[in-house]
Structure formats: structure tokens, C-alpha cells
Amino acid sequence: MGRNEARAEFTWRPLAESDLQAVTDLALACLSADGGQPFAASIGFARQRYLSGAESRAAWHGARLVCASSLREAAAAGDGGPAALVTTGLVHPRWRRRGLGGSAFDWAADRAGSAGLRAETEALNDGAHALYVSRGLSQVFAEDVMQLRAQATVPAVHPSVGLDLLQWGEADPGRFYAVYVAAFRDRPGFPGWPQERWIEWIRTDEDFRPEWTLLATQGDSDVGFIAGEATGWIAQMGVVPSARGHGIGAILIGEAVRRMRSAGETAVTLNVNINNPHAAALYARLGFVRIGRRARYEAEALGYCDDGAVIFTPARSQSSSSRARAKGATPVCSISRTAVRASAARRAAVTWSAILRRAVMSGAPPLRARSARSCRHAWRLVSVSGGDDAAWLRASAGWV
């Protein structure tokens, strides 16, 4: 059965409040198959992502919801820039590979028009990654979701000499913020929020638990903090650079877990950025295991780096294009090659095909590989993906 025939099996319409339980059931099915953020299947989260102020489009197979997509406005950028539009989507595991996800995303992209579009997922899978890349988006953020199971215990850690823990309300919130900044300001993507905004974000959340939000002090210095929320959720944990390596993070997590479980929570969950292996290693030593990944994708200019497969180098492409325009010449995009593991060859091929096709259709050619080896490697990858991409791109881009 072809994809167009398969789509005829489904009825598409916007979501309504009466569909909320169906959305959470769909999210739960996706989490069961893909792993990810546990609260993504909650009523509150589903309402916020798919109904409250959002446009939506959903596919039904009889009475069963099998695909849902939404488009909403993101929070205003911290730098005062325009707010992006965000799309979120779910496809039931039993109804994947029928073009539903692509149709749902294309609807969101059409509705967004020329506005910046961002895709977010709380339960990333290979199919979603391939879809976003094929539509010209690249992964700009990803976190592993880690969980301490209900039956797991945190290894005992002996407190550092002179270390005290104060909960929120026993210390000025500004002290928590100061530790947050010291712990995270050197991390990629640090938002740089002012104190008032960060404090408001922490304490106005309906799930905020002040008794699980702790400040670690040693002598006259504040050295670490942890922010806890309902359902056993650790929203943030950080230690200032000068105090790392002394078990302070482990002590904060251990105490937060103890308090959460005393209050009746079972599993404890947190997120860790994939570019923070030291924190991930700490959580693993304490018994946390990876249960999924969440991610964000954004559209960029013709050059970007996606998951180890460098397609275009933006700085070189933009500078060469600028020089070419200054001289009245045709812009040239420089293509670089990167080593690709055999197991990732097909995904790399799809990426090459999608980005090269996008480059050609946007008027970027003629394309120039940095070497004959790069050119041969590109076409070898494209040919793996099958279809007519290789021939189409060869003719359109003028490569031989």
C-alpha cells in the first residue's frame, strides 16, 4: 500500500478538550516504545502542548488517535528577539512509517510560513530525528532523561566537613541564584537570565517544592544547590567549579531523594545535557539509568553540523558567499566530508540527500567539494539512501 493510500485510512481534524485523554494515551504509548520524559504523558503537559493557545492537527484511525501535531508560540527570547513558533508531534508506534509524521510536520511548517520554526520532542526516536533532518532542521539541544528506580537506593556519601544544607526559605533566594550562575554560566547554551526571572521560574511553578530545594554551604561560601519538584523531579542541580570533586553533588542528590521518598515519591527523575558527561557519570554512579532522550531542532542557514555529520561549514560558506557577492560572482557552498560509522551510514545518507536537495532548490549551486575524495564520498552516501536523489542532485548541482 502506498503512502497516499495509507493516509486515506485516517481522519484529520483539530484537537478539542474532549480529546485530552486520547492525547495522554498516545503520549504514553510513545513513551513505552521510545522512553523519554515521564511527565510528557500527564494531563497538564498534554493540555499545555496541544490545547492551551496552540493550533493542532490530529489523525484518527476509527476512534483511536494515532498522530497529533501542534503549533504554538514559544516564550519570548531572553535576548529580546522575536519568539519562535514551536511544533510538537506524536505518532503511535503501530502506525509509524506511513507518512503520518511527515504530513503532520509539513502542516506545522506551512502554518508557520516564514516565521522561525522549532521542533521539540520529549521522547526522541530515530524516525523523528530523520524526519526533522530531512526537513532541514538540525539538533541544537538534547538531554538524556535519567531515573532512579523505585527500588534503587543512593549510595551513602559521607558529608564534607562543615557542609550544611539549607532549604528554600531558610536562605535568601538570591544566594541560590548566585550558585546557579556560578555553576552553569560556562555551560553551552546558558540562558543568562536575570535573577528576578530565574527566581520566578523556580518558585512560581505549581510543582515547586521548597523543602526539596536545598542550598549547600561550607564555611562562609555557598557551594551547591538542588531544585526539587513534585513527582520526584529534580529540575536543576549544580556545584560551583571551585567545590567540585568533593562529593557535594552526591550529597545534595542523596538528601533530596531521601526527602522525596519520605513524602511518598518512588522514582526520581532528572535530565542531563548530552554534552555534560561528567554529570551523567555522577548520576550513573548514584544509580540513575538512562530511560530516553528529549531534544530540540531548529532551522538554520545552509550550513550546519548534525550529530557528527558535517554537511556545510557555515562560517566558510557565509564568508565565501559574501566575498563572491562583493565581486559579483556566483556564491559557492563549500562541502566537507566527515567519517561516518558503518552503523550510521544510512542516516548520514538521508542527511546528505536532504541537505544537498535543499541547497540546490534554494539556488545555492554550483556546489564545490573540497576534494575529489569528498565528492566521491558524498555520492557514495547518497546512493545508500536509494531513490532518485543521486541522479537528481547530480544533474541539478552539476556534479559529475
Image (cartoon, rainbow, N blue to C red):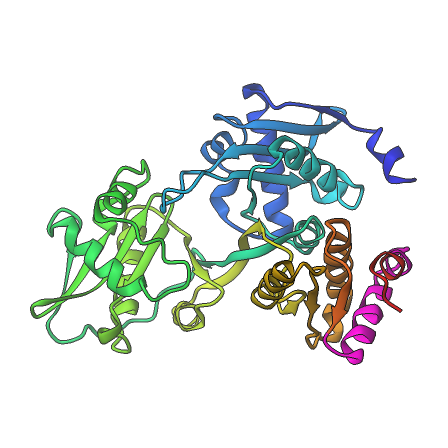
Q: Residue furthest left?
A: 220
- Please tell me which residue lies in front, 197 or 268: 197
Where residue 323 appears, x then y in whole percent?
A: 60, 64
Q: Residue at x 60, y 54 (%)?
A: 301
The C terminus sits in image quarter: bottom right
Q: Quadrant of residue 14?
A: top right
Q: Quadrant of residue 272?
A: bottom left
Where residue 93 appears, x then y in whole percent?
A: 71, 45
Q: Please determine whether, in this image, residue 189 is positioned above or below residue 245.
A: above
- Please tell me which residue lies in front, 47 or 368: 368
Q: Please determine whether, in this image, residue 175 is positioned above or below residue 112.
A: below
Residue 117, visible in the rendered structure = yes
Horizontal placement of 266 versus 333: left or right?
left
Q: Residue furthest front?
A: 327
Instruction: Identify the magenta region.
Output: 370-392
Q: Residue at x 67, y 54 (%)?
A: 133
- Please tell me which residue lies in front, 198 or 19: 198
Horizontal placement of 250 versus 380: left or right?
left
